[in-house]
Amino acid sequence: MSNQALEQLAERAGIAIEWTDANNRPQRVSPEVLRKVLTALGYPASTDEDVAASVKNAQEQADSHELAPLLTADYGQPLSLQRWLPAGAACTVLLEDGATLELRLDSQGALPGMLPVGYQQVRVEGQHFTVAVAPARCYGVADALEAAAPRAWGIGVQLYSLRRPHDGGFGDTQALEALVRAAGERGADAVAISPMHAMFSSDTTRYSPYSPSSRLFLNSLYAAPGTVLGERALRAAIERANLESTFTELENLELVDWPKAAEAKLRLLRTLHEDFGQGEHPMQEDFASFRHRGGEALADHCCFEALQAECARRGEPQDWRQWPPAWRDPRSAEVAQFAQAHAQEIEFYAFGQWLIARSLERAQDAARASGMRIGLIADLAVGADGAGSQAWSRQDELLAALTVGAPPDILNRSGQSWGISAFSPEGLKRHGFRAFIEMLRANFAHAGGLRIDHVLGLNRLWVIPQGEKPTEGAYLHYPLDDLLRLLALESYRHKAIVLGEDLGTVPDGLREKLAARDILGMRVLLFEQYHSGAFKPLLEWPDNALATTSTHDLPPLKGWWRTNEIDWNRRLELIDEKTEREWRQTRVAEKNGLEHILKQDPQNFADEHHEHDIADHIIDASVRFIGHTRAPLVLLPIEDALGLVEQPNLPGTIDEHPNWRRRLTGTGAALLDQPDPARRLELLAVARRQAHERDR
């Protein structure tokens, strides 16, 4: 009986009791795991008494006649309210443009589908709520290019890997400006970049862009202060902080030394902030306006940064879940007192956010001015660190007691724990999806597109209680239709395309739902093959997904051809001899399969010269191949344009491999003017034009 009640509670909480693994085998979550996950979700379930009480509370909430603060609807479609309101009830709707509509619910208790797209305020029967009316689909590549069958192309780059003179040891928005101008001049419509989310200023050893402190704000280290404050102010601050020799040393390194480079950049930013506060700087009014518009969310983030820095100074835990109880509450009197006493420190963090926002805005303006019709494509990480700013400030909307990961599969037999927290489905609903909407707006703000990492997370996520193994988790379902409507609405308002990284085990029907909303999926050349090792021909590539050669978690084509990632895995003892041998045998078949499909095009290998590495010809042919697909957008990783061997990130490693540290050679136009990238970008541009002529 207790297991029946436990499973009833799990279903109410959105936990999938049964699921199918990557081997297509049915699985069932054990009662022990259900209890742990439910408790972490806020449904006490340690004992049968706890379960009974949680079931009762859940039922009372379900029976409540109080409307949620925000409901979503599709444009032109009625919104059923019969669960809460009587048929025929009179409604007053205040539209975003200030107009008022007087309506009545129809005989089925539904709000008529006549509200315009946007966030509309409804009053009925003494209750007030918002209706987010979504367009049928997101803003698409076809909209951006004003073409029925678009065949756009762009490049993908890890922002930190870029170089420019006096960059301080890693790429920033000024280096990005130079790159987007150069790419735009060559006909690119987009540049996709690595995540720029806010990290932990007090802990410079944490730099994985997919484990941020907050997805609401940006990493101020990427700011280019000279482009905002002027080069004279920048040079004066570098000299006053005595950073010239340090920056020169860092710039000459092959890999990014994140701790040292971040400390140097923070020192520079502090000096600039001190100088900025002296006298009447012409940008002070803009800074004040930025802080005002940032509101509570910006104030919370900056206060969190200051609190964390104070803990670091004292040698105390920086994880807010281990702070004194009063500091764990952003609205406590003690936090308010701290903020007042440390106003200058908090202003410094706001100054950093202002600089990076203005710097990124400049980069997107440069992209559009260069002729790009999309411009920057930002990257949205699947979650934020549970110890970070977003989890602290939005505690009822994020699951800080759970971490996101993946169940055991063919490649990871122990499963994966990514060390990040996700949204609470119930918390989102209780707060009118505030945390989700503000996150979308923050990431659309200075971009022409948004890539959503692990877009499957809009449907379900594998959640694991803190401290437990990945096997001790379960799938948690999310309000997919609500999230897709909000995503379409914000995409439409920002005129920005949406890409969904849909690799892995995709739930049935999800890709169809994403395609219906014009959210492009992702097809990677190295994955587009049959079990036999044969690669899929051009006609089997879809027209509702972007095409690319590789990803940041995979080797570039030359590295794949040379089995570089197998070498790394064996060297680091991540695989045994048997696995290595089988992997290499499979790779031989895969290489034969790729070469076979590429030779179907007579243009490929026609200019092959013996003095060139066969891998270079494979790259050229692959670039032409993905260019000829029906994909509305093709993104070529800069590593493949350059013909590099090493990959940005090796999954399954932390410090053993130089993840998120590799730097490129050359700057801006000079980088793309090198013979290999110049040739490959021209090959891609020509192939895209040919695909457009073929398919229009």
Image: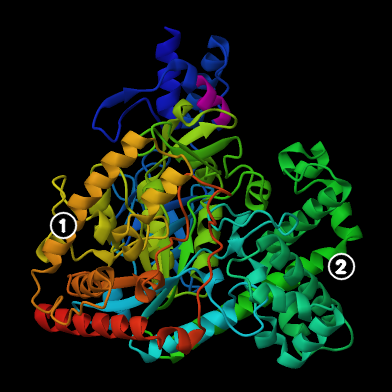
Sequence order check, earlier mark of 2 and 1 = 2
Q: Secondary structure at mark 1?
A: helix
- Work out whether residue 506 can be spotted: no
Taking the magenta stretch, the answer to whether it contains residue 419 is no
Amino acid type of disc 2?
Answer: Gln
Q: Main secondary structure of the magenta part?
A: helix
Q: Residue furthest top?
A: 1
| Number of residue marks | 2
Residue indicated by mark 1 = 592
Quadrant of residue 182 within the rendered picture? bottom left
Q: Is residue 144 visible?
A: yes
* Few, some or many residues within 10 Å of mark 1 (<14, 14–19, 20+): few
Q: In which quadrant is the C terminus drawn?
A: bottom left
Q: CA distance from mark 2 to mark 1?
A: 62 Å
Q: Nearer the viewer, residue 68 or 309?
A: 309
Residue 497 percent across, percent down from the top left? 36, 70
- Quadrant in which the N terminus appears: top left
Q: Which residue is mark 2?
A: 344
In the image, residue 418 above or below residue 277 = above
Q: Farthest front residue?
A: 611
Side of 352 relative to 679 (left or right):
right
Q: Is residue 348 left or right of residue 527?
A: right
**Colour scheme shown:** rainbow
The part of the chain drawn in magenta is 35-40
